[in-house]
Amino acid sequence: MPSVLPGGNLGVTVFFVLSGYLITTLLLAEHERTGRIDLRSFYVRRAARLLPGLLVLLPVYVIVFSRQQSAWQLMLLVGPVLLYLSSFVQAIWGAMGPLAWTWSLSVEEHFYACFPPVLRWLLNGRDDRRPGVRGWLRRHPLSVMTGGAAAMIVLATGLRIYLAGSVHWDEFAYYATPTRVDALAVGCLAALFGHRYHRALPAVAGWGALAVIGWCYANPAFTIGSDALNLYGLPLCEVAAAVLIVSVVNGPRGLLARALSLRPLVHLGVISYGLYLWNLLPGQTWTLLLGRHAGTAGTVLLFAVIFLAVELSYRYVERPAMRWARARLPASKVRGAAGSRRRYGARGLRALVREG
């Protein structure tokens, strides 16, 4: 609904910050609990959470858009999605067509591929007494991660500033992993802050951050591709999202945390991946078949279709896949997730931890 929320694309940025925070928090908690990070279990959980729903959706996309494009063209689009290259294909060539939205999943997967092994290598070297830079890096893992995250923020922001005003590289600044990784890094910094300091922020900080995010969503200057978005819209929303997350997690008894822990909102968080997958397809299908926008009544109908598809996907595809994965993980991993839920308290975060 661009007329209502012209800056609504920033919801992806909020999600990136939350993802960086959540993954970092879970990995640090696992290392504290067990003395190690089990990458196999991490990637099994990621695959079980992300792949089944996507593999159900992609054939539907191929069927729907076979009226408009050849099967060969559609398979060329599906390939980058499954290889998690769609962020670069869209950023460089703008060639992802109806599957352009998968760029953000590609960015996420690049983060999953790189960050956990690096964090494990650093954390497993606390007792490394060798002289030199390598030994120092492994003896101070959290300081290194803090510096690394800060460097990624500076580099990604600097690259967007450098590309501002360039017509040819306009889409690169929005879709490419190197220019969007700063949001995930901000989430990592928030997690590292929360790991070291458990003090609640003033209530006004959380409410102020929520207000800033709402203002960003409603700001017509923050449309995709605008210089305002790339220069200061993204950094502003990232910082606000980090402050909001830390405020809620470190102050679970506050009014804001309790408001965001209402069951309908928590359920939206639980099914959020399915909403990400299915939210565009019904509207795209309507436009493809009828050649026009759905209008108000049609949009209401499409929302009902979206939620029905998402609930069916969650109940019969995503949740069984997660149960299958948990049954193949060591019992300590299941107990570990419960321990993380006890530590971080807020119902919404507990639900996210439970869902992987």
Image (cartoon, rainbow, N blue to C red):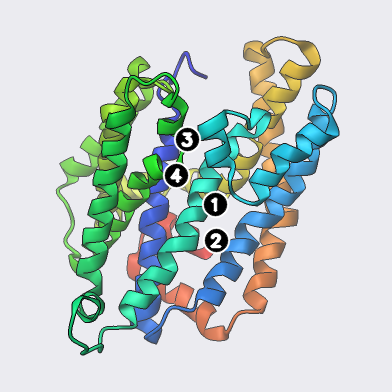
Q: Rounded to the nearest whole Å, what is the CA distance between mark 1 and mark 4?
A: 25 Å
The residue that label 3 is drawn on is 175
Give, as a three-letter code, the residue at label 3. Answer: Tyr
What residue do we see at 21% from left, 90% from top? 129
The residue that label 1 is drawn on is 270
> Which mark is drawn over residue 338?
none
Give, as a three-letter code, the residue at label 2. Answer: Glu
Disc 1, SS = helix
Q: Quadrant of residue 214?
A: top left
Q: Earlier in the sequence, mark 3 or mark 1?
A: 3
Residue 349 shown left or right of residue 60 in the figure = left
Disc 2, SS = loop
Q: Is residue 164 above or below residue 346?
A: above
Front residue (pair 337, 86):
86
Q: Quadrant of residue 111?
A: bottom left
Q: Earlier in the sequence, mark 2 or mark 4?
A: 4
The residue that label 2 is drawn on is 355
Q: Is residue 267 above or below residue 232?
A: below
The residue that label 4 is drawn on is 177
